[in-house]
Image (cartoon, grey):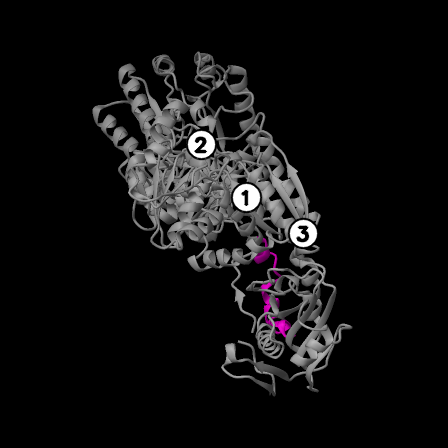
Amino acid sequence: MAREVTERTGGTERLVLMGIHRRGDEIAALLHDEIEKAEGKPVALGSLDITLYRDDLGTVGPRPLIGESTLPPEGIDDRVVVIVDDVLYTGRTARAALNELMDWGRPSKVYLCVLIDRGGRELPIQPDIVGRKVEVIGNRKIEVLVPALDGRLAVEIVKNLPAEK
Amino acid sequence: MTPTVAHFGKDLIGLEPLTGDQIRAILDTAEPFKEISERRIKKVPVLRGKTIVNLFFEPSTRTRISFEFAEKRLSADTVNIQTAGSSVVKGETLVDTARNLEAMRIDMVVMRHSASGAARFLAERIPSNVINAGDGSHEHPTQGLLDLLTIRDNLGKIEGAKVCIVGDILHSRVARSNIYGLIKLGAEVAVCGPPTLQPVGIEELGVHIFNRVEEAIEWADALNVLRLQLERMQSGYVPSLREYNRLWGISTARLEHAPKELLILHPGPMNRGVEIDSDVADGEHSVILDQVTNGVAVRMAVLYLLAGGAPEKAESAKGGAES
Amino acid sequence: MKKKTGAKAAARFADGAPILFRGGRVVDPSQSLDGVKDLLLVDGRVEALGKGLSAPDGARVVDCKGLVVMPGLIDVHVHLREPGGEHKETIQTGARAAAAGGFTAVGAMPNTDPPIDNPAAVAFVLAAGQRAGAARVYPLGCISVGQKGERLAEIGEMVAAGAVGITDDGHPVMDSGLMRLALEYAQIFGVPVADHPEDLGLSRGGAMNEGLVATRLGLHGKPNASEDVHILRDLIVAELTGGHIHLQHVSTRLGIDAIRQAKARGVRVTAEATPHHMLLTDEAVEGYRTEAKMNPPLRSRADVDAVIEGFRDGTLDVLATDHAPHHYDEKEQAFDDAPNGIVGLETALGLVHAHLVGPGVIDLSTMVERMSVSPAKAFNLPGGTLRKGSPADVTVMDPAHVWTIDADTFLSKSHNTPFNGWELAGRAVMTVVGGRVVWELE
């Protein structure tokens, strides 16, 4: 995936990786390290918390906690931004991330990179870089585990979606 | 799945009915909103399509503008109504105002009124969220919250902090909101000022009383200096502004006797040379402009927390965060 | 909706027909009487009181087994709002509300618009009261012209026109010199000077009792001292002049102590206790409830206890409701802007019976003393007794009748009461004025 990113974006010079909080962040960080190792050059990294851009806030009861969005110091104007998330499902998060990105600045180009594409899109949004495409039926859930949050890197399909706590 | 902040009700009328945890949650929510005001595009779509009326029955520039910025930065549509009139006229229009707002399907109302209890009066009569922007001598909860946030930012924590509110406690809604908020978050609170401006029974709220400001300075980590309204002199609570400044004014000379560095807050607008001297207001320990900055963030947080959908929809919404 | 019970019930028997109350517990402290007896009313007078009375021809016989028969209750402190405030109450609706609450007579306060400060105005109230055909309405006149506290009104002329007392109620007489003149002058006409004891300097800006609740709510307080100072002033001036001072709605501990001491010294003083100052503290204001806004304000627990004790031992010898009707939208305001006062005529008997007689704070005889005998004495009114030959004003109460206060059913035009929803045992079931049934519970 790291190689595909640099191929698509034409090197690291104008590249900014923007992970979507919280697990997209972690995937972006892993990608970031891989690319820096492979290219031997520093790569800009940021994160997006899309809470305030969600399209369901008018109906959500308890308010979600808001995380922090961080930008690389040089900003994103005229840069090639790769939005990174763990799972692409309905496309609504990607839509929110795009909107937030546009409020931050004007990138020259934006790509969407996800570890897992599980289908089930509700908006006309498609990823540019996909780790793996997995067909999952609606009531099942796919979970990406990352070392920083879960202690290991894994992808699990949870059968019979458990009741939310 | 998505961590959430607990609801604290339809309205924000005061800090007295809130728990320490609820107050802490508002302050924590204010943190990420500070950053939005630093962006080039200072706007997020979180309240897009919501209609908010800023209903000010008393003249106010600072609070109204702070709310208006907070609302606009959250993309709400806002209407400002500012009226001033005799007490009777205000009283009569309050019920009608409530009915009119209800008829116009307003989502939220931010109200300032000269009568204590006015915000609660409105909140009990309309389905919209009501935020109290100051009701008489009762409460001014967002001012209390921004003072708390400023103290927390500057002292690191509120628990154990010694905060003295100096001035006209009797007529001050800022003082009451500060007292409730500070005590719920574990601070020690004192009040200091002319005995004529101390309300009866204030010590039963759990505050110390200092008659002399020198004692307060010796004791406190932070001073919240209240504005002395000119009317207090006209109605005889204090003999003159000059004497007030001599006895209770916060000056550099007085602060030199402080055993430690004191944080100086003031809810504004200041009467320089009356309750606070310019060299203190503009001095290095003054966090008065931090308060103004925090005011917008705190109000954004309150608007965000109140503007949510109905709690009964919470269950279905929880799954919505999946990508 | 409203149950207009009175008129229909009264129409079943011809006016003036004799009435025999058979087998009730007759409580009449004016004759130190408390026992099962029959009471016969003929031609608007008490004809006989005794055992085994026989009913004259055409008499209505009322079976009073289990009921209490007492001299008609008198409330010497009501605001009937007419003229000028007819949207709140009229003399007719007020007199009917009084009858429904078991009162056979009320003393109407003169703070109307215009105020009752001249004989013509007194005559107007008296005539309107007679037309109402319910409880008797006794007008009080103003102490000062226009209640301005500047110079005496025509007290002699007003008494001649039917005024039973003078007062500037609602406007305390702040000028001690004027109070001295009133107490001196009123003596020769045999009427008391009733005063609303409040030092306006000490109570300035206040909307409720001074204390923790006011401080928390951000409302300005009226300290007890504002009432204490004025009570002491009135007592001292009454002592100086030998005049009869009647202190209205006393609510403070120190004030009651002062009255007790003055009575012991022989000062001519009578004083009122209200049901609300015995049953509610300033905590009832919590939530900015304007139906708990009144003047004097609801006070602390210690004051409530003192009022009850003063009422029990007779320091406060008169129960008065300070019935103060207000239109609903006048109370539907921010607390500071809402007017003072609550209605009381239709709740007083039930409240006193359920909450003071029921728990044994006072006995039934003391209740009748405070609600009928003493008020009649204080204002030299006919009534307050069931002696042979006295006016046939009778209240019949069912002490076991359990009911819930529902302001929507009040006969008063106004519904402003903090007692709505209270469940009480004890209610007037029949009110008779001058031998006529003016109200009867269906």
- Residue designated by label 1: B133
Q: Is B147 situated left or right of C310 in this image?
A: right
Query: Which disc is residue B278 wearing?
Result: 2
Circle 1/circle 3 CB separation < 8 Å: no
Let me know if marks 3 and 2 both belong to one chain: yes
Q: Mark 3 lies on which chain?
A: B
- Which region shows up in magenta? B303-323
Q: Is the magenta stretch mostly helix, strand or loop?
A: helix
Residue B121 on image: x %, y %: 55, 45
Dot 3: element: loop
- Residue designated by label 3: B76
Q: Can residue C102 be seen in this view?
A: no
**With respect to residue C227, does B162 lie above or below?**
below
The amino acid type, in three-letter code, at marker 1 is: Ala
Residue B211 on image: x %, y %: 30, 34
Judged by depth in the image, the label closer to the viewer, 1 or 3, is: 3
Q: Is C206 situated left or right of A71 in this image?
A: left
Report crowding for label 2: few under 14, some 14 to 19, many 20 or more residues within 10 A (C-alpha): some
**Which one is in front, A138 or C431?**
A138
Residue C108 on image: x %, y %: 48, 27
Q: Is residue B109 visible?
A: yes
Pointer 1 or 3: first along the chain: 3
**Which one is in front, C221 or B78?**
B78
The amino acid type, in three-letter code, at marker 3 is: Ala
Confirm whether the magenta stretch covers residue B80: no
The amino acid type, in three-letter code, at marker 2 is: Ser
Dot 1: element: strand
